Amino acid sequence: MADEGIYREVDQEVEEEKQLRQLRESAPYLIGLAVVVIAIVGGWQFWNAQKANAARTNAEAFSEAVNTEEATASLSELTALRQDAPAGYSALAGFRIAGLEAQNGNTEGAIATLNSVAANDSIPDRLRNLATVKAAYMALDESPDAALRQLNGLQDGDSVISAYAKEIAGLAAIESGDYAAAVTYFDAIPTIENVPDPIVQRAQGFRAIASLGASGVSLETQSMGQSLESLLDLPVPAEAETDALLGSEGLDGDGESAPVAGTDPAEGTDSAAAEADENDTQEDGTSSD
């Protein structure tokens, strides 16, 4: 029995010595692994801090450019921001630039700016479609065909943004004298899910005019002509609806949200600025994977 106890003690000592030797052999690897983990965590924290600083810088630059009283200075600041900022803020700057160009009477330049936003496949479809709609509203002043070219088939969809495209297509059809097509477009608008009341109400008014034209009533009389002119002279999509289009689901998805009841979709973009940060952050995260 004494011999067995001695053997156990010897075996235990041998095992402990073996474990200690293995620990010594693996120690450099364990230390190296710990260093790597610390470096990764530190790098991740530094990267997040840099992203946060960049987001704050972009937000401040965008806010300063938007709030600049002088249009020329604002346009210059927005142009610089559009060139240097990530995709989200670059797109928002593009919307603002187009608005300033339109205010200065440069509709052609405004449409070109919006087209460049719409052509940027690094931003969500939501923003690209919004740029398309804005450009099409502006193009109505040029000609019905120009507006339809801008839409490029967007009016054939069934999303909320497509409801605005149908409105434009219907107005273009009225202006072209194709009243039956106009009625079809305006009838389709209320059938789209989540379409806000203002556009439905407008569609009903436009449909009534198109129906008069389809029944042979002349729209060229002074009173009807003035009415039609005022209806066709729509503002380019306005702030409240833009903020809703951008804000309901953020800038990271392709779904369409219902715009806020009020005006047309899209002049202002202030409340979307924070979501531009989110969008650009998601893009950074995707590219780093």
Image: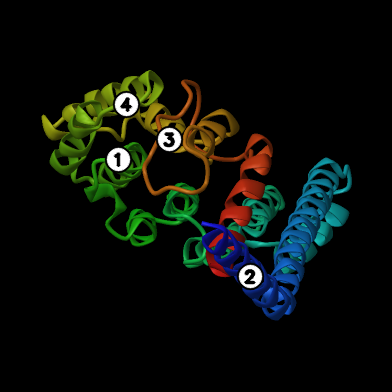
Q: Residue at label 1? A: 159
Residue type (three-letter) at the residue carrying disc 3: Glu
Q: Residue at label 3? A: 229
Q: Residues under labels 3 and 2: Cα distance?
A: 91 Å
Q: Which mark is residue 19?
A: 2
Residue type (three-letter) at the residue carrying disc 4: Asn
Q: Residue at label 4? A: 194
Of mark 2 and mark 4, the one earlier in the sequence is 2
Label 4, secondary structure: give it. loop
Label 3, secondary structure: give it. helix
Of mark 3 and mark 1, the one earlier in the sequence is 1
**On the rendered structure, is 126 left or right of 47?**
left
The reply to whether residue 114 is visible in this rendering is no
* Residue 35 image position (x, y, % from top left): 77, 70
**On the rendered structure, is 192 left or right of 269?**
left
Between circles 3 and 2, the one closer to the viewer is: 2
Instruction: Determine the image quadrant of residue 219.
Output: top left
Q: Residues under labels 2 and 4: Cα distance?
A: 69 Å
Of mark 2 and mark 1, the one earlier in the sequence is 2
Between circles 3 and 1, the one closer to the viewer is: 1
Residue type (three-letter) at the residue carrying disc 2: Gln
User: Looking at the image, which residue is at 64% across and 76% down?
Assistant: 22
